[in-house]
Image: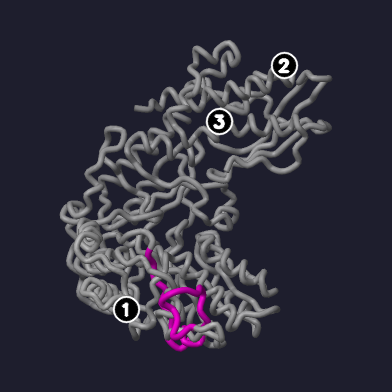
Amino acid sequence: MADLNELYQSVILDHNRSPRNFREIPDSEHHAKGHNPLCGDRLTVWAELDGDTITDVSFVGDGCAISKASASLMTEAVKGKTITEARKMFAGFQDLVTGQRTPQESKEVLGKLVLFAGVSEFPVRVKCASLSWHTLNAALEDVTETIKTE
Amino acid sequence: MAATSGSQVAPPGLEVSAVRADFPVLATKVHGKPLVYLDNAATAQKPVVVIEAVDRFLREQNANIHRGVHTLSVEATEAYDAVRSKTRGFINAAADREIVFVRGTTEAVNLVAHSYGQKAIRAGDEILVSEMEHHSNLVPWQLWAEQVGASVRMLPMDDRGELDLDSLPALLTDRTRMVAVAHVSNALGTVNPIAEIVAVAHDRGIPVLVDGAQAVPHLAVDVAALGCDFYAFSGHKMFGPTGVGVLYGRAELLDAMPPYQGGGGMIASVSFEGTTYAPIPTRFEAGTPAIAEVIGLGAAIDYLEQVGLASVAAYETELVQYAVERIGAVPGVRIIGTPAHRAGAVSLVMDAAHPHDIGTVLDQDGIAVRAGHHCSQPVMDHFGVPATVRASFALYNTRDEVDALVEGLGRVNRMFG
């Protein structure tokens, strides 16, 4: 049976209550909007780049605890990483939340983000967890249309 | 809840434990807990009489209708037509030919938007649609309006979730060709005063289409008393199968409307020089219909009439009132929509958690609710929320289930607060 406490770990609840990097980066060239039509989650992700390195990243939006905590923890995780490293984390995160890789297998790439492993037991919530990553990816590619998870 | 019965005698009380025993799925466990099914506005559960009627038809009677001279086809045709008569009685229509079987409410509205639209809605004309409509009673009108250059105008609602009827006369112009309104709001539970709206519209010669999908499971519907021109509903929300619904249309209007889809069954004669069409209602039933599902719908009507819609309405009014009081007393809960007349649904948001999180937590307690925009985004926009949790009730729900929901909402507060 899926465990609610595995899904809503205290770190996730904390980031939901007090999301980190929850702000705009006004003059950033790299930003994108994400939308999950199923539950109405909407967020915008901003990124600052110095060459290939993500020097700052932030988000603003409204959504469920999983989507907000995922966005918040993502911003912490990718800051200071290169675009290639961030994409590798995105791929690893997708594998984790869809149950294709275990937390143990994912630990090296994802670090603290393995606490989203509980999402894999709740298939309808996978899109909540991955919305911010899709949106970051779009921001890095300077995609102008809103990214939708449906 | 506004049942239209003029009877002074209180309806017989509903024996909820006996009713529950009629619905096999209610014995299911979800995550080890007894199922508390509060998603009836999405689809209702099926009583054993409906399940068995479909099963029996497929095992013993299955044949296409209006086709063969063989015995099974004749029997299937008779059974199908008998449900048409039964449906006429169920909503008090004047004649069987006013009952068109469709796939569901959505198809019924699309049929009217296209077919009545072809007949009477042109460039520059207006269609008045209420702000609380399900997308299925808004988008078909937008599609038609876009096609011909007509416009869709909005009949607004207030912050209680009731339609602003004072604004109605001014919104009806000499270009208004249709008023489209829900009998009961799927997102808020509001019961709209249809007869009153119809009277104002008819004063100006404007027809009214009523989306009755959320009304038929909860209250006795009498299209003659309502006075509406079209009334649409779905089988699956009134304890029948999916894939079948009903469009009631006044014969005079249906008669003048062109076919919606072409195919077998809807013709009088066909040649390459030209085709003439069958009379109503078969003109609108192209192709093989959902025969087994229509049979199941007939069993659902029998079931509702046997329990008695007056009893259902009385029981649910009391239950939903209890739910509103208990839910409203949970700290941090805001009920979205506080209409004076409510049937079926209670929508809510919580300070502590997003509707989607609430839905997931409740599901772990075996409680099925809907979290989302309920295909009513204009309603969400009106109340400034992206989504709500909707608990929607039916004749088999109990006070204990309301208590379980309230306990679950308390758990959400403890987890996220």
Way the structure is coloured: one colour
Find numbered disc 1 in the image and state the secondary structure of the residue it sits on.
helix
The answer to whether residue B90 shows anywhere in this view is: no
B184 left or right of B305 in image:
right
B212 versus A82 height, above or below: below
| Chain containing the residue with disc 3 | A
Decide: marks 3, 1 in contact (CB < 8 A)?
no
- The residue at the point 69 percent across, 42 percent down is A146
In front of the other: A128 or B325? A128
**Span colored in magenta:** B244-270
Q: Give the residue pinned by disc 3.
A: A129
Name the element at disc 2.
Answer: loop
Q: CA distance from mark 3 to mark 1?
A: 49 Å
Residue with the mark numbered 2: A81
The lab-note entry on whether marks 2 and 1 share a chain reads no
The vertical placement of A35 against B50, above or below, is above
The residue wearing badge 1 is B88
Do tag 2 and tag 3 residues touch (Cβ < 8 Å)? Answer: no
Q: Are marks 3 and 1 on the same chain?
A: no
Q: Residue at x 39, y 64 (%)?
A: B234
Image point 35% across, 47% down: which residue? B326
Q: Is residue B325 left or right of residue B19?
A: right
Give the answer, above or below, for where A98 lies relative to B106.
above
Going by the numbered disc 1, the residue's amino acid type is: Arg
Q: Spatial distance from mark 2 to mark 3, Cα to Cα?
A: 20 Å
> Can residue A98 be seen at all in this image of the molecule?
yes
